[in-house]
Image (cartoon, coloured by chain):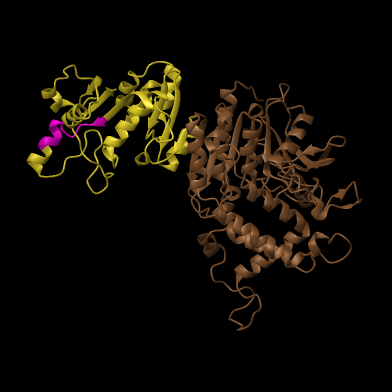
Amino acid sequence: MNAHHLRADLRALAELVQPGDKVLDLGCGDGALLRYLMDTRQIIGRGIELSEANVLACVGKGLSVRQGNLDEGLRDYPDQSFDTVILSQTLPYLDNPAFILCEMLRVGRRALVSFANWGHWRCRLELLFTGRSPQAPGLPQAWDTAPRARPLTVRDFIEFCAREHITITRSIYLGESQRALRAARLGENIRVAVAIFEVR
Amino acid sequence: MRDKSRITYHARHSMDNSNSLGIVERKYFTFAENAPMPLDSGEALGPITLAYETYGQLDAARANAILICHALSGDAHAAGRSPDGKIGWWDDCIGPGKAFDTNKYFVICSNVIGGCQGSTGPSSINPRTGAPYALDFPVITIADMVRAQRHLIDHLGIEKLLAVAGGSMGGMQALQWTVSYPARVRAALPLATTARHSPMLIAFSEVGRQAIYADPHWRSGNYYDDGARPNTGLALARMIGHITYLSEESMHRKFGRRLEGREHFGYEFDTEFAVESYLHYKGNRFTERFDANSYLYITKAMDYFDLANGNGSLAKAFERCAHIMYLVVSFTSDWLYPAYHSKEMVSALTAIGADVTYCNLQSTWGHDAFLLEVETMTRLIADFLDRVVAQNGIVTR
């Protein structure tokens, strides 16, 4: 697959994957990221996906994917059986995010987590000035049609990791233009549209 | 004149349809003539004849062979048209350009032992007595069926199957193949099946068998002389089976409460509802092609099927299967082999690190969905096989 066809946040996330890694992608969607990683980084890829249409799309891309619900956990997967476990743009939609993050770190040596930052200035201003519930940056959907989500911010995630003794080893912040922001200080996170963390 | 020649042209070309295999030939392979094949029961069987068909060409490297395993009432005629005009039971999925593409793959299907469609079973002649085995035929298991198939695969000179595939009881054989002969299988496609027959399935099997035992013509299985056959019992067993292959929704769609051949209730016990008429038809048709004793033996083999048994756990059973690629498919309306059966095997396969693809497909067709959801199955199977081929570095034509 041509890198230009891959969403910018997936491309940025892919940068954190080591060539040859064994990768488990949770909520792998239509398999675009896994396919890209297999083609460009020669990874061994596995996916879990809830929707039948997406599972079929993944199989069509030559991927090994299981239809399943992440909220049931990763109990079939042995400890430390993957190099990297990915949770891309899925965290806010899980019933029990803390449980899944723990499971990811049990199954993988490290986890890559990306999510839209509801702490972005546009979200803050939208609520403040329009009185309407803010939509996730980059995922503009009205409250009545968007999938049920728990909005979270970069700060929420960092504090959560500290509390749960999860170590953030790398972070990539993308701004509204989908370009990486250089500043990574917490105070700057008002500019972050999508955050990508490597945790261990 | 012109019109007539056009009709002939069309007739010839529709018979010789590019995605049909055309007329296929049934073949036979006999083995265990000198040394009978040992069975799980401790008994042995021999000689054994297997009826089989093949479609497509075996490539030079003998690497493109796919074994198709049939379900309870199936036979070796999986695809194409038999000389007497019957279309194979999985013709929708086997042929040029189909799910199991015979332009690429060499497809084999054999009738199971214990069966009655050309392979050795209770209606075959027992060489020791010169009469049909009837209940002297040894009780067989799914593993025994697979053991016999392995002799056929040896005979065909195939060291390693590209894939072994089947739905329902065919799926049990596919799973059993990977457990019994892991080194000889690259991929398995167990569809709408289970790794362990549940008590509910055993219950349905037993009711079917009781229907046969209760038929006075069954005569403890000794009905092969010119007398009447236990057709009433066998038809009843088949009717029960057919109910379990459908779903409530598919019955609503297929029959509703429609009456057959009448406008109003007759207030009598004649066949009135369309669903009744369907079951009678299916039951009676079945007796024309199936042997009641075979029905007993094959349902018993399914009831004994439990891969975890004797291996400690399912994961333990699959211990030597980590290199095999699996495509597991269940169907949302299949209440005979509900999705949790498939999920159990997917869990065990995941635990041992096998490459397993799983999908629980939306369908209203019940258990029969594996034969009826042709479009989705074609996509899934063809894509999966492409990956098996690519991952194993096999070159197909």
Question: Which region of the structure is painted magenta?
Answer: A115-125
Chain A representation colour: yellow
User: Which image quadrant: the C terminus of chain B?
Assistant: top right
Question: At 66% from the left edge and 40% from the top edge, which residue is drawn?
Answer: B94
In this image, A112 relative to B372: left or right? left
In this image, B351 relative to B297: left or right? left
Question: At 71% from the left edge and 21% from the top edge, which residue is drawn?
Answer: B61
Count the numbered circles shown. 0
- Residue sticking out furthest to the left: A129
Residue B267 in view (yes/no): yes
* Residue A57 image position (x, y, % from top left): 46, 36
* Residue B292 image position (x, y, % from top left): 76, 58
Q: Is residue B362 above or below residue B230?
A: above
Chain B representation colour: brown
Q: Quadrant of residue A174?
A: top left
Residue B119 sits inside the magenta stretch: no
* Residue B111 image position (x, y, % from top left): 75, 44
Residue A116 sits inside the magenta stretch: yes
In this image, A164 relative to B183: left or right? left
Question: At 50% from the left edge and 36% from the top edge, which residue is drawn?
Answer: B348
